[in-house]
Amino acid sequence: MSHSSSNDISRVESMGDKKSDHEQSADPSMLKTGDQVKAGDSKKSKEEKKEEFRPALPPEPLATWRKVLKDVWIGESKNIKVELCETILTNIFIVSNNLFEDILLLHKICPDYSTQKMSTLAGFVMQYFAQWLNKCDRSELYERYLTRQLQMEALETAVVKHTTHLRTIADIYRLKVKEMMTPACNAVKRLLELKNYRDAINCAAVFDLQEEIPIEQIVVPCLLQNGYLAIEAYLKDRRDLQIELVRFFDNFVGMDNAKMRERVRCLHESGLLPMSQMKMQSKTLEKLVAKLISIYGLRGDEAAPNLARCRQEGSLRYVVSKHFIEGTMSEESYTDYVSHALKDDQHLQHYFVKHLYRIGEIDDAVRWVVHCKMNTNIPHSVRAIMDQTRIQSAEEKISRLRERRKDMVDVNLFDGHPVIMVDTIMSLRRLIGVFETASIIGIDTEWKPMFLSTVEQVALLQVSTRSCSYLVDVIKLEEEIGEEEWMEFFKALFCTESSMKLGFDFANDMRVLRASFPFLESMQPDMKNVICIMKLATSLISENSASLDLPVDEAHGSASNENTADELPSDEQQLHFKLADLYYRLLGERLDKREQMKYAAMDAYCLIRIYDRMKVRATEEFGMNWQTHLEMSDVIQVKPKQPKKGKKKATRVDDNELQQMMERVNAAVDESTANGQRPSDVKVIVDSMMFGLGKHLRRCGIDTILAETRDSLVECAKRERERYILTSGKAYNELLRNRALCASNRILCVPAVQTMNAIEQIEYVLKYFHIKLHKEDI
């Protein structure tokens, strides 16, 4: 059945005549008066106007087919409507005189043709047509009905609104042929002109046009519009394009914002980039490049050299801060980290020595010049202060550290509990024998620093039993043993029923172990009794908050990957604490970090002591069902999927709550020895995660700035030295390490919403600053 378009042409001509009339009436001499307007055009009713602009009905029998399908699709239940629509469409296929043309028109006139979903009536028509064709003799149908003109119309229909059904239509109408490549490429270019990057990349992927369009013009803008799924299909199995995309963004890593804007502007003006700006911070770019490397399984040092360099430099700044500013990293650990990083890397040697000089650690800068035997690569500022005395002092320190390392071969964690280094295949096999008799095993991991690996990989595995601790040197053993020996080792460690395996943030440790040893993925179903101490603690607290009695100031996290739980999802309502905090709270002892080998072994051994103390408190002091809590904290056990929780609504603080809180705060300030302050005396800036608290503090009359980004927070705090910083969780530790803020004593860690509600957070801040509130302040 061939359908004429004469009605459409006459409607277009009619609209053209009306336009001419309108242009003539624009003559001032022919303008209507107000009375004439009221008497004429305004008399049309709303229904008449709707009728005038209503699209023309499709010709029969398409109009009837559309109405029947629409009524069934809307009016019937899912199972019934599918069956009925299949029957209706089958009958249409039989009676149609031009099947391909009629179905294309029917697809276009479906009421949900513009909806970007697969589960629409328009989509169902095409999907069922494709299924039906697969059961027929296609060649005869194509020869009889399919024309080049119809293929062009099918392509237009598939891309004009969206590209959800393009792949199905391309298969039905044989669009992926040589003759259609140029029209398809033109369609992609039109979509790019409209800045519809997601549909453009879908269209290019369907027709395999990756070689025709530079990634800067299609993939980059689509990625910046969060079109990850479309890009995944576009770049699948195209490693060359994956690397090209990573390198594009890597070129911006390490640039300041001004340089980044200038580079984007130049790319835009040269026609290589369709957008004139990229609203991305440097940290966001680093995370994006790292994510792409992970997704595509690329080597970071090859695909993203700038990211690798930034990670190396950042890691060195981090260990310098831990050693010199925080004092939480021993001399041995610091020396080991830096020695690994600087080995044979002249650029990094130059950067590190210069950094030490800038922060005032001049003697250490000289030490590393001597250690690395730098000759021509010494920064000018460091060369100027090097004299024989400093060089001799550096040489003596290096010798002293080497001698101390020799003395650390035989180490005891405490009397009767040796620490044994496992760095040969024979010592590893002896350790396998230990697992067969152990009833409880503490496990902890140390990861390779980011300057040694662009992905997280295990460097040291700490394993403790009640009588001995073992340090498994993974890096050294990798040179000696293969996958078969590692499989035997981990099977003995994780898959024995008789022993309890303990880790602190065990899910995180397992993630890094799987990244280092991929075969652990298939071994996971056979693992037994793998208990996460963090989950166990959270489970006990959820039943009885007094069972561990963690104080509020110990419920925030650390930014280190060492003995720290990751940020927990807010909907799980779990506490966030460090291993050292839990150990101190339960056992009243501090973890000794002074000697590297002892501290590494203690990380694993202390888990056994924590477990024992938890069990005693839970069963003997609080009468809890210990086995139930163990099952809740087993990271291998498959748990039933919980129903998805709705989005948490913002907490509102009503006037009565505010009044009661004000009375409590004022009473506390009156009882304290400190002088009370007025709200106008205090200025704060709140981190982006605490905007709710910030708005409530404004309501109390406190001068409050809401920082959109971490950079803007730091800049504001540097400008306004009297303004306090309010933050929480890992961000608190990160800000403490910031050189511009570390000595200011202006950073307040507010307990997170998991442990305090909104009114309690406000009360916490007001009491901290001894602020007295009056009604007129609100």
Image (tube, grey):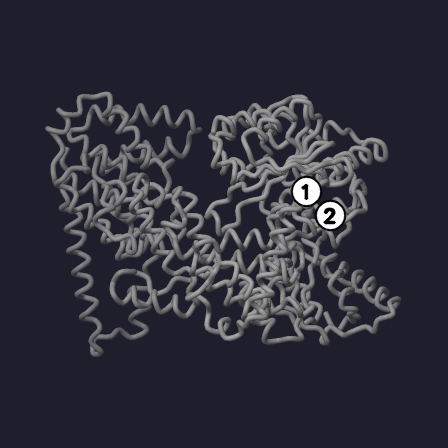
- Asked whether the viewer can see residue 214, the reply is yes
Q: Quadrant of the C terminus?
A: bottom right
The one nearer the camera, 160 or 67, is 160
In depth, the one of 83 and 701 nearer the eye is: 701
User: What label does residue 730 carry, if any?
Assistant: none
Residue 388 x/y as whole percent: 55, 70
Please state which amino acid type lies under the numbered disc 1: Asp
657 displayed left or right of 119: right
Q: Earlier in the sequence, mark 1 or mark 2?
A: 2
The residue at the point 32 percent across, 36 percent down is 123
The residue drawn where x is 55% and y is 52% is 337
Q: Amino acid at mark 2?
A: Leu
Q: Position of residue 722 (x, y in %)?
A: 67, 75
Q: Quadrant of the N terminus?
A: top left
- Number of numbered discs present? 2
Q: Residues within 10 Å of mark 1 (few under 14, many from 20)?
A: many
Mark 2 closeness class: few <14, some 14–19, many ≥20 residues within 10 Å: some
Residue hosting label 2? 591
Name the element at disc 2: loop
Residue 495 to residue 659: above or below: above
Name the residue beneath numbered marker 1.
603
The image shows residue 552 at horizontal and vertical percentages of 75, 52
Left or right? Give the position of 769 relative to 208.
right
Res. 52 visible in picture: no
Q: Quadrant of residue 542?
A: top right
Left or right relative to 307: residue 210: left
User: Disc 1 versus disc 2: distance between alpha carbons?
Assistant: 8 Å
Q: Answer yes or no: do the residues labelled 1 and 2 have beta carbons within 8 Å? A: yes
